[in-house]
Image: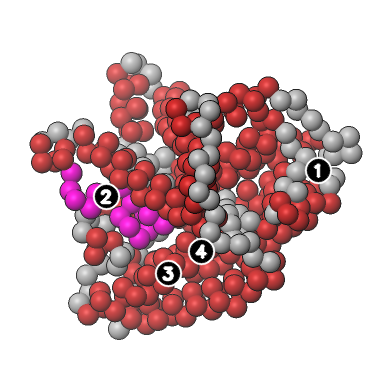
């Protein structure tokens, strides 16, 4: 692990004790930020291009070649914008909400394994930690809606809280289904158990149990679909974007935000998009594992393998991010009652039935 390597390096520099641990932890925590910020800039550009081509137009073309500098221009614009706080807003809550939104999104990356040599924290309850820490985002959205003193913001915040809390239920049930089969909730361990064999990905970590292996595959597919839909709702992406429905609520919970505070909400949304994509990838599609083996192993270059793993991890995550964008520009927005019906009448009962069937098969 990189953290252990950093500790050894600091010992070589004669830095030991709590100071070494603090420095190593700080450096270790910088890597997700280095990943998130370039990803967000690229994802904003990609979404514009994806939507443009789906609508038979070009999208941004003027700033840089094919508009690839447009995201950087937007960041420069947001940095220079005036920081406006409504006169009747709760100033302290209004200011802390966007920070809390990003902190909740960023903290989720602590348990996501980027490669076999880098995971922020290889805790055994990694996926449960992610579900728990993402609740900070719910609190931040409620704070933003309430503190703005705007009826549209408050309505968007209440919608978001109800939506995210509801869709966490089928998410957790699918995670329990996974636990029945693998016996672990560590994303790192799950990724390590899944070999380069695509067949092994779909039955969770290469589980081998005779006829059960074949019997589990359709139920794992059902779990994967439920998890993807639930995580799509948790990050407020179309068709589940009613908390910020422009046609009804202007911009929902961030209606009153400008400049870098708005940018932090935006950054948190795109960080969440990749986080949930990485979770689906790690649970069902091998995580950072390559489906074709590693060039580094064939050539005997061991240091090349982690870079290959980072490539596959990023590509799998980007594929599911692209699917989220694809759905945004394909499906209409659901009504509030339709969104809740999908969760409580369909996803929760199906996920529970799926869990019971898988548990029964494992008991046999």
Residue found at the far front of this picture: 56
Residue at label 4? 229
Point out the tag, 4 or 1, that comes first from the N-terminus.
Answer: 1
Element on which disc 1 rests: loop
Q: Residue at x 80, y 43 (%)?
A: 147
Residue at label 1? 148
Does 203 appear above or below 250?
A: below
Q: What is the C-alpha distance between the residues marked 4 and 2?
A: 24 Å
Does 53 appear above or below 34?
A: below
Q: Nearer the viewer, mark 4 or mark 3?
A: 4
Residue found at the far left of this picture: 299
Element on which disc 4 rests: helix
Q: Is residue 20 magenta?
A: no
What percent of the width, then of the height, locates residue 162? 68, 62
| Residue bounds of the magenta highlight | 277-294
Residue at label 2? 289
Point out the tag, 4 or 2, that comes first from the N-terminus.
Answer: 4
Q: In the drawing, does residue 296 fall left or right of residue 272? A: left
Q: Residues within 10 Å of mark 1 (few under 14, many from 20)?
A: many
């Amino acid at each position: 692990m990189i953290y252990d390597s950093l500790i050894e390096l600091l010992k070589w520099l004669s830095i030991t004790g709590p100071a070494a641990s603090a420095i190593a932890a700080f450096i270790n925590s910088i890597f997700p930020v280095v990943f998130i910020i370039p990803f967000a800039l690229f994802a904003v550009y990609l979404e514009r291009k994806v939507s443009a081509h789906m609508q038979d137009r070009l999208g941004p073309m003027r700033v840089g070649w094919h508009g690839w500098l447009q995201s950087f221009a937007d960041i420069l614009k947001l940095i220079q914008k005036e920081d406006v706080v409504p006169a009747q807003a709760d100033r302290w809550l209004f200011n802390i909400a966007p920070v809390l939104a990003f902190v909740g999104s960023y903290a989720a990356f602590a348990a996501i394994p980027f490669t076999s040599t880098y995971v922020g924290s290889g805790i055994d309850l990694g996926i449960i930690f992610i579900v728990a820490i993402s609740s900070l985002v719910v609190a931040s959205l409620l704070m933003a809606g309430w503190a703005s003193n705007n009826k549209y913001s408050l309505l968007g915040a209440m919608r978001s809280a109800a939506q995210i809390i509801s869709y966490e239920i089928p998410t957790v049930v699918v995670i329990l289904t996974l636990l029945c089969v693998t016996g672990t909730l560590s994303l790192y361990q799950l990724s390590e158990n899944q070999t380069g064999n695509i067949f092994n990905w779909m039955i969770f970590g290469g589980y081998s149990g005779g006829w059960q292996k074949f019997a589990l595959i359709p139920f794992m597919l059902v779990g994967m679909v439920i998890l993807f839909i639930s995580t799509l709702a948790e990050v407020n992406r179309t068709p589940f974007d009613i908390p910020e429905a422009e046609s009804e609520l202007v911009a929902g919970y961030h209606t009153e935000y400008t400049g870098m505070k708005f940018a932090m909400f935006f950054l948190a949304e795109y960080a969440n998009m990749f986080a949930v994509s990485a979770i689906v990838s790690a649970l069902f599609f091998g995580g950072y594992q390559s489906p074709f083996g590693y060039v580094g192993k064939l050539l005997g270059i061991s240091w090349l393998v982690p870079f290959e793993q980072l490539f596959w991890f990023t590509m799998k995550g980007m594929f599911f991010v692209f699917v989220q964008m694809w759905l945004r520009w394909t499906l209409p927005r659901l009504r509030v009652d339709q969104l809740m019906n999908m969760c409580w009448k369909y996803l929760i009962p199906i996920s529970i039935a799926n869990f019971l069937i898988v548990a029964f098969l494992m008991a046999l």
